[in-house]
Image: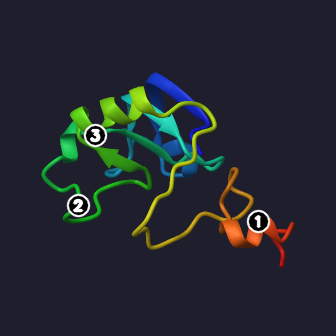
Amino acid sequence: MAQEKYDVKQMSSASYGLPTNCALGYDSAIPLAVRLSNSGIFAHSAPWSVADQGVRNVSHGCINMPPDAVQWFYDTFSYGDIVQVTGASTPLAPDDGDWNIPWEQWLKGSALT
């Protein structure tokens, strides 16, 4: 679900334990970021990885999008809108945000059943 929207979001690898001064570390202002999980997964603009998007994984866990596509996403989705992500190798945990369990399971009344 779209939880928060930022015109620019400061993101740092230190937020998940990777120091910003190591080879894969970063501390960057990221444009057009939409939070999708409590653990910090965002869909955001990633012009630096357009050539790799849909070809290989070059993300630190977020959904990297080309600037034109993310502009549409940012303008179209609002707080509370459901976002279904497919093709990810690791599903979100049921307690990592809202609506992270299958609809049929939610209808039963418990994420534990």
Q: Nearer the viewer, residue 8 or 67?
A: 67
User: Which label lies toward us, 1 or 2?
Assistant: 1
Q: Position of residue 83 (x, y in %)?
A: 52, 49
Check the image and report above or below for 23 versus 72: below
Residue at (31, 51) in percent of width and height: 23
Residue identifier under label 1: 106
Say which residue label 3 marks: 46
Report the Cα–Cα distance between label 1 and label 2.
31 Å
Which badge, 1 or 2, comes first in the chain's sequence?
2
Quadrant of the snapshot with the C terminus: bottom right
Tell me which corner region of the image, top left, top right, bottom left or bottom right, holds residue 68: top left
10 Å neighbourhood of mark 1: few (<14), some, or many (≥20)? Answer: some
Confirm whether residue 95 shows in the render. Answer: yes
Foreground: 27 or 107? 107
Question: Is label 2 in a helix, a strand or a loop?
Answer: loop
In space, the residues marked 3 and 2 are separated at their CA atoms by 13 Å
- Answer above or below: position of 110 versus 21: below
Give the residue at x 29% y 44%: 65
Q: Residue furthest top?
A: 7
